[in-house]
Image (cartoon, helix red, strand yellow):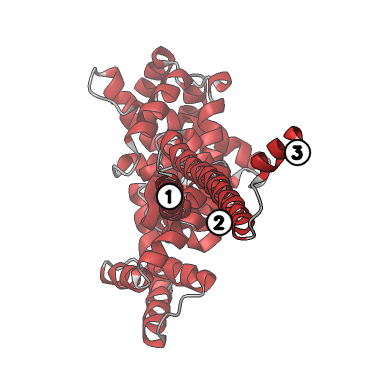
Amino acid sequence: MRRLRLGSALAGMALSVAVCAALWPHAREATAILAAQDDPAALSDIHINSALRSNQALVAENIETALAEGDSDLANSFVELARDKGIAVSDELSKRVSDAVTDAGSASHFAKRFATGLVTGNADDVASLSGTVAGDLFVFGDIRDVVREGKHLATGEEADRLVLGLATVGLAVTAATYVSVGGVGPLRAGLSMVKDARKVGRLGEGLTQWAGRSAREVVDAPVLQQAVAKGSVLRPGETVSAIRAAFRAEKAGALVRLAKDVGRVGEKAGTRGALDTLRIAQGPKDVARAARLAESKGGQTRAILKLLGRGALLLAAGTFNLTMWVFGALLALFGFLSSIKATTERATEAWLRRKKARRFRQQAAAGLPSGPALAGAVTQG
């Protein structure tokens, strides 16, 4: 029975060690993730390191895919990520990326994309965004969008109120841009990027709903309808003055903050990085986190967003699940310590019993009475 008790304690200790060893890596990673949940850069580092440990070829595979899709900017982002993580990229692959980036930045390509952005108002790279922002700075782009969507609204047709609101805010911001000699340029670029992302369907569903509600509050619809009825791209001065009367500046704070954060992402991670952010973001808090990530990671941001998606910006797993990993590991550790205590106690008891039995045997072999018998003899004497 005593040996069984000691064996049970040893088995419990072995089981606790096995469970703790299995849970500890998950618990350690969960602890790091919980500690980094408010730091997008640190959070993304944990997830990226984990992904790279599982697949060392991940970077090279994504570079090849980006080049095949003609996205040299994304391919270069993965090269920067590889450099930061100490992952080797072959000279041949690096040269292909360098050549693709050079070709995308050629004068002819830039001019073509600039003209596309200026005329259509759609942007997906630096050149086309430059054309879009140029059109918006000269109020052509915003007037075009306000007049088009405003006329839909006036005639009872379906109007894109988000584009309408962003264009209206843009007209007010453009005036501030001129006054400050470009001091609010990132805000102006941010508004253009949000508007363009909406036009080409690259604005996340959650962010679209939030921005749509905010845009409705910015525009005084009746006043705007009157302005649009008389407005024209050919009469920019009169049209801008009439449209500004429909702008509620006191309601524009949320949209302005969103546009500033988008502009910050664009400055550090590029136009496509900002558009990638708008595609996965479910609200303004996601965009603000992306801005912090871009300021820390710069050109690596697109690669990180490609690999992790929205998980780069916030906890991919629930806090409860992560806490349970930690709790499970601590419970296993407690079980291990308890097993050590129980094993030590049982081993000590067994040792004391053996020592006492050995002493009694020695006394018996020497012909001496045992302790109790000797005590009785003394009493009788």
Residue 217 image offset from top left, x and y in percent: 46, 18
Out of 286 and 265, give the one closest to the viewer.
286
**Residue type, numbered disc 1:** Arg
Are the residues at dot 1 and dot 3 in contact (C-beta closer than 8 Å)? no
- First in residue order: circle 2 vs circle 1: 1
**Residue type, numbered disc 3:** Val
Kindly state the secondary structure of the residue where label 1 is placed.
helix
Label 2 belongs to which residue?
268
Residue 139 image offset from top left, x and y in percent: 48, 40
Q: CA distance from mark 1 to mark 3?
A: 37 Å
Are the residues at dot 2 and dot 3 in contact (C-beta closer than 8 Å)? no
The extreme top residue here reads: 222
Q: Residues within 10 Å of mark 1 (few under 14, many from 20)?
A: few
The extreme bottom residue here reads: 91
Q: Nearer the viewer, mark 1 or mark 3?
A: 3
Q: Residue at x 37, y 37 (%)?
A: 144
Q: CA distance from mark 2 to mark 1?
A: 68 Å
- First in residue order: circle 2 vs circle 3: 2
Tag shown at residue 3: 1
Residue 135 image offset from top left, x and y in percent: 45, 47
Q: Quadrant of residue 220?
A: top left
Kindly state the secondary structure of the residue where label 2 is placed.
helix
Q: Residue at x 59, y 36 (%)?
A: 175
